[in-house]
Amino acid sequence: MQGCKPLSGEFDGHLVGQRAMFRALLGALNIALSMTKRNASSTPASRLMVVVAWVGGIASVGGLVAMVLIAIDKISAGQGLETYRTKWMVEDNWIGFLFFVVVTTVVVLAAAIIGWFQRRSERREVQQLHARYSEGHHG
């Protein structure tokens, strides 16, 4: 690989390393994008995969609801600060878990509201552009 010569005339090996890293990053990005593109021979997701995804999602929501109910029972019984360990050996208490669930719910709702306003604004802007540049308005 050919290096870059700065104005001083000295060889700058650091730029060669950056260029190689940049090429590697672009190569990885190209591979990732080519994996996501659908070609004519690719088939859509099978019904079994869709059903499995829905069943998994429903089971996950059910597990979360069950854990929230357990947390509410523990807090009602005065054991809210009792420490439990997750599967990954992370220690938490029931009040912290409920706080996490509430904050996560608020953040997801805020993101949904912001997205709704943004989509509504974009639709309004597209309608204005269609009205402005439609065939009947300019000659």
Image (tube, rainbow, N blue to C red):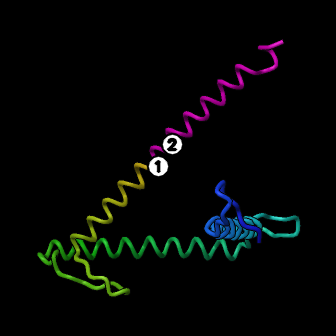
Q: Residue 45 in the image: state x and y as whole percent.
A: 73, 70
Identity of the residue furthest to the right in this view: 40
Q: Quick check: 105 left or right of 126?
A: left
As helix, strand or loop, the secondary structure at mark 2 comes to: helix
Mark 2 touches mark 1? (CB < 8 Å): yes
Magenta stretch secondary structure, dominant: helix
- Label 2 to label 1: alpha-carbon separation: 6 Å
Q: Quadrant of residue 122?
A: top right
Residue 127 percent location from the top left of the image: 66, 27
Q: Is residue 111 visible?
A: yes
Q: Residue at x 31, y 83 (%)?
A: 90
Rendered image: mark on residue 112: 1
Viewer-proximal residue among 82 and 64: 82
Left or right: residue 138 versus residue 69 is right
Q: Is residue 36 visible?
A: no
The answer to which image quadrant residue 14 occupies is bottom right
**Residue in view at x 50 percent, y 71 percent:** 58
